Image (spheres, rainbow, N blue to C red):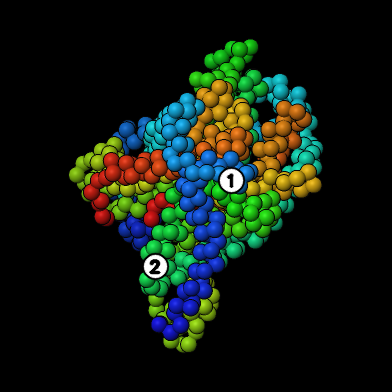
Amino acid sequence: MQHRKYPFIVGFLIVPLVLYITFVIWPYIQTIGYSLTNWQGESQTFKFVGFQNYSDLFHDGVFRTALWHNILLLIFLPVVTILLALFFAFMVNVGGRSTAGGVQGVRGASIYKVVYFFPQVLSVAILIVLFGAIYRSDSAGLLNGVLTKLHLEDANNPIEWLNDPNLVLWCLLGVQVWAGVGFYLVLFSAAMQSIPKDIYEAALLDGADRSQTFFKVTLPLLWDTVQTSWVYISIFAMDFFALVSGLTQGTYGGGPDHHSEVMSTYLMRNFLYFGKSGYACAQGVMIMLLTMIVSVITLRASRRDRIEF
Amino acid sequence: MTSPITESQAGLINQTPDARGLRKGQKAADDERYDGAGGRVLNVFSHGFLILWAILIILPLLWIILGAFKNNAEIGSSAWSWPSHWSFGSFGRAWDKGIGKFFLNTVIVMIFSVPLTMLFGSMVAYVLARYTFPGNRFFYFLFVGGAMFPYFLALVPLFFMVKNLGMLNTYQGLILVYIAYSLPFTTFFMHSFFKTLPTAIHEAAVLDGASHTRTFFQVMIPMAKPGLLSVGIFNVLGQWNQYILPVTLMQPQSSTDPDRSMLAQGLVNLSLQQGYSGDYPALFAGMVVAMLPVLVVYLSFQRQVQAGLTAGTLK
């Protein structure tokens, strides 16, 4: 095996490695470097300003608003998505009639999974166009149309979903939940089905009912998956760029009056519109740090003894 | 289609006709003991919620497809309007407004980016999974770690990197960037796949005098086909749907530079221009055009798509 092993290894690694370092790793590192400069983008001259950008950030009201919105998303997006996904996964997998083999899935479980999962394969661009039409501010929008039909709102006085400062962020959250639940449903279902049958049989023999089985057996065994999902959704909650910039008012979104501003949209506006590249990089680093902190906290806080089965 | 659990249970339980008869009697008794009224209520309850969410997913999509057949006045008047006459005119207008060109651009890029992603990703994964050498773990984490961060953290320097290489708004630039950003997941997935393949065949090939490269292409790649299919579909969907990278890298650089927008990006641009041109049916038709290939791939490879997309988090 030692025979000409190293030339082969180098030969296989070199091209992908060069590509990867050039376009992924090096830009990540550069982001950190540029964040310490007053670089303005187009001009190639810039000077080292230390942590000036970072202290500016903390005094920047818009950035603080954006940060607060990301924190709100960080709290609510995982909670809502995971609870809904767990609920539906429970319904799909154990909501059916019982048989001798124990509790079983509902009829048509795989059809539900196919339908629920579908938004996950749609481009965010499609979500933008789709929800632009759903959240339309007059009665021709789907949501206003439905609410008017149900006599929950006055047709002459429709809700301006994406223009309402108090609603806009939650509307965007709704889009991501709509798109994401199916993915985590399938993920949790796969994890549930990998739990050996005899554990359920043992619980049944001991006289456990459905909800006891779920909370005492299924959920603890799913914990690893829930935890990983939480980290994944958190990373999503730190992003939100495409949805905000595509659906809300203003250059790269954020409107009305910064009520839907998130860090990534503010970063892009600083970079491509105001030309403050160095400042934008500092925001990038902040997002990177926060993502790492959130991941570590999530993994630590939810640490349990791993159950092998 | 029935639930996979039911099928596997049926397979386990109903092995002989004798056993089946026996189980049936027992089943009725078990139902009586365990299920009672509660099970039936729960069954109705769970179907109710499941159907409600399914409607929430399907209804907006059907509504958009219907919208492609309406005219502007019908779309603007009420959400409940019905197309007065069915024609595919809006699809033609959408195609002419650029959807056709964007479609072609996306296909051109992906003809190169997807196979090359698969090739490079498998090469890296194979070397890291099957060979021990100093720095193996380092390279593994270097490649896989890139998946940790959202793309836009690297966007500012990436933009200038591509600009300095003179590849802004070029197909080759976007192809290289797509490959680079698809490598982490591809490597990660194929790494765990190569680990699970038996070593015996590999060793036999080496003993027969095959070179490392030949072993890879003629022995390992054919064995890795199921894994390649899953991650390949994942990459097709991911790159087809990619939005933020083309938005940053594929803007025309001068007035003579042709518009090489990708489909997702072009669609959003069209929707942002709606205020001026106001052709909603064409916009909805464009969306249907963008969605159709994804729907076909998804429905035909449904199992692999779900497996591929969820594998990353489960491992």
Q: Quadrant of the N terminus of chain A?
A: bottom left
How far across and down, in percent of the image, does residue A96 sit?
Answer: 39, 40
Residue that carries the numbered disc 2 in the rendered image = B136
Report which quarter residue A55 is drawn in. top left
Question: A73 above or below A307?
Answer: above
Q: Tell me the kind of residue under disc 1.
A: Thr
**Badge 2 sits on which subunit?**
B
Labels 1, 2: front one: 1
Along the viewing direction, whichever of A263 and A212 lies nearer the viewer:
A263
| Callout 2: SS | helix
- At horizontal 52% and vertical 78% (from top left) the residue drawn is B213
How far across and down, in percent of the image, does residue A117 sit?
Answer: 51, 44
**Badge 1 sits on which subunit?**
A
| Callout 1: SS | loop
Disc 1 to disc 2, C-alpha distance: 39 Å
How far across and down, in percent of the image, does residue B302 sit?
Answer: 53, 52
Question: A233 above or below B120?
Answer: above
Residue that carries the numbered disc 1 in the rendered image = A45
How far across and down, in percent of the image, does residue A299 sit?
Answer: 32, 45
Q: Is residue A115 visible?
A: no
- At horizontal 37% and vertical 64% (from top left) the residue drawn is B137
- At horizontal 49% and vertical 34% (from top left) the residue drawn is A263
Specify few, some or many for label 2: CA neighbours under 10 Å numbering under 14, 14-19, or 20 or more.
some
- Left/right placement of residue B62 relative to residue A173 reads right
Along the viewing direction, whichever of B95 and B154 lies nearer the viewer:
B154
Along the viewing direction, whichever of A202 and A147 lies nearer the viewer:
A147
Q: Can residue A59 be seen in this view?
A: yes
Farthest-out residue, bottom:
B208
Q: Residue A186 carries which label?
A: none
Q: Tell me the kind of residue under disc 2.
A: Asn
Farthest-out residue, left:
A206
Q: Quadrant of the C terminus of chain A?
A: bottom left
